[in-house]
Amino acid sequence: MADVILFVKDFELAAKLSSVCVDYNHQIEFSDENTDPSDFSQNVRLAIVDMDEQVFSSVGLIAALKRKGIKIVGTMTKINNKDRSKLLAAGCDIILTKASLIKNVPKLISEFFENPKST
C-alpha cells in the first residue's frame, strides 16, 4: 500500500519524485483533483502537492489531507510570501521550490518517516 501520495501532473517532476521515493523503499500513489482523501490508505504519511497546478492549490485539499494526519510538502516554481503564508496556515508542513524539492526529497522522507512527530 502506498505511503506517499503525489498530487503532480508535470510528468518530469512526477518521474523524478517517484524514482527517489522508490529508491528509498516507499510506495507511491498518484492522485488527481477527483481523488477523495477519505479513500487514502492508513499507511499514507506524506503528500507532495504541486501548488502551481490550479486544481491542487486549493486550501480545501490541504486541509483535508491535514485532517487525515498526512504530512504535506507543497512545491511551487516560485514562492511568494502571500501564497506561502496561506498554504502554511492551511496545513502545509513545508513549501519548497521545485528545484530544491528534488534535492531535498531524501531528507524529507527521512524526517517524516523516521521522525513522524517532527515538522
Image: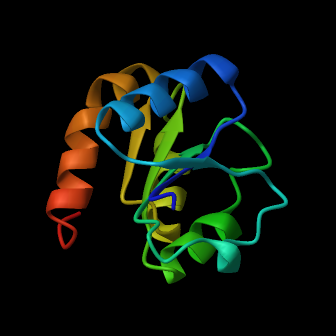
Quarter placement of the C terminus:
bottom left
Find residue 100 and report its image quarter: top left
Q: Toward the viewer: 95 or 2? A: 2
Q: Is residue 114 above or below residue 104?
A: below
Relative to 71, is 14 above or below?
above
Residue at image position (33%, 30%) is: 23
* Residue located at (17% from left, 66% from top): 118
Q: Is residue 81 left or right of residue 37?
A: left
User: Considering depth in this image, is 46 or 25 the residue closer to the camera?
Assistant: 25
Image side of residue 1 versus residue 7, left or right? left
Taking 62 as reference, is 73 left or right? Answer: left
- The image's colour scheme reads rainbow
The image shows residue 52, relative to residue 66, as above or below, that is: above
Q: Nearer the viewer, residue 4 or 53?
A: 4
Camera-side residue of 107 and 50 = 107
**For the image shown, how many numbered marks are present on the structure?**
0
Q: Residue at x 27, y 31 (%)?
A: 104
Instruction: Where is residue 50? Give x, y as percent.
Output: 60, 40
Q: Position of residue 14 (x, y in %)?
A: 59, 29
Using the rendered view, name the quadrant where residue 59 is placed: bottom right
Q: Position of residue 34 (x, y in %)?
A: 85, 60
The location of residue 35, given as percent across then percent down, is 77, 63
**Picture residue at 61% right of the left edge, 71% below the top:** 40
